[in-house]
Image: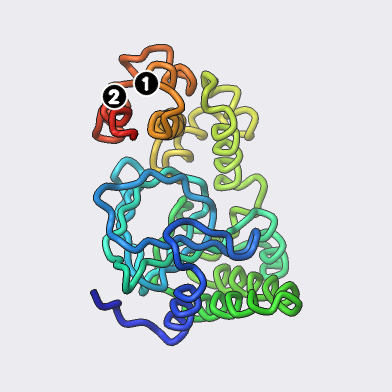
Amino acid sequence: MEPHHQSNDLRVITDWLGQRVINDGYYVLSEGNLEVTRASSVSSEQTNVLTQPCVCIVSQGAKLVTAGKGSLQYVENESSMVVYASEIPIRVAINRASEEHPYFCLMVPLTARRISEVASRLYPNGIPKAGKESAVYVRESVPQIVNAIRRMLQNIDDPKQGDLLIPLAIEEVVVRLLCSDIGPAIAQMGVSDSHTAQINQAISWLKKHYTLPMRVEELARDIGMSVSSFHAHFKAIVGITPLQFQKTLRLQAARRLIISNEMDVSLAAFEVGYASTSQFSREYVREFGIAPSRDSSLVP
């Protein structure tokens, strides 16, 4: 399987990763700055993942991503750049990878503080009006961002200079991102009372307390929104409702418990907050296309 046409920077990135990241999996290359995922075979089924706010570029291979209960589907490959502005549940299937040409995806984490620091200098008179805020932005790859990531990788080889140069390259990535057509929307991540920032606060709470009953009125009040505004903006940005988001977190956590053979089906259901095993089983099948008992029986 031959790789698609690559820019010179993507070839350098792929060569660098090919020499150092030799096993499949997820790796942190530079804490808080750069992460990578490697796969050497295509996926037989989609994997459920909770994204982190980040910039993603694929240097080799491709994956199909489904988000928002199937309402959004896109391919990440060497010609695309995907920016995640929120933590959202997605389904991923690697559809181009091999032992000879493994799939490599690099991620530059984005934080509200990192965005805010750059935006305050880039937009001293205030952030321009943003278009529709979203959790996912799929764009053509920006060559200058790819180049900055290539330099970050090469600086990892020189820890003394890298500690000084990598933060500069990260800042360049953020500057380039904020100067792009989606810049004003991404900048909202760093504005504490923007809809994106408020929804991200709610997501953080749900991640920590997904096993508890959700009191929508309290959560909306805590992030400074009315209940109707909270529902509308959560679904507009994330693609699903707050209740569906919590349900997805519960089901993903339960599946990890079942597949790791830590718990049987009923115990896993109660552990993640379900009061009814039958309801849990119905929603599990709807989410994963397989009964929890079958997942349990697949465990060695």
- Judged left or right of residue 114, residue 105 is left
In this orientation, does residue 61 appear? yes
Q: Which mark is residue 293?
A: 2
Q: Earlier in the sequence, mark 1 or mark 2?
A: 1
Task: Please say if the residues under marks 1 and 2 sit with CB atoms less than 8 Å apart.
Answer: yes
144 or 267, which lies in front?
Answer: 267
Image coordinates of residue 280 in percent, x first then y, are: 35, 20
Image coordinates of residue 81 in percent, x first then y, are: 43, 68
Above/below status of 144 relative to 49: below
| Most distant residue in the bottom direction | 8
Q: Which mark is residue 265?
A: 1
Residue drawn 48% across and 40% down?
233
Q: What is the three-letter code of the residue carrying label 1?
A: Val
- Judged left or right of residue 20, residue 223 is right
Above/below status of 175 relative to 120: below
Q: How is the image coloured?
A: rainbow
The local secondary structure at tag 1 comes to helix
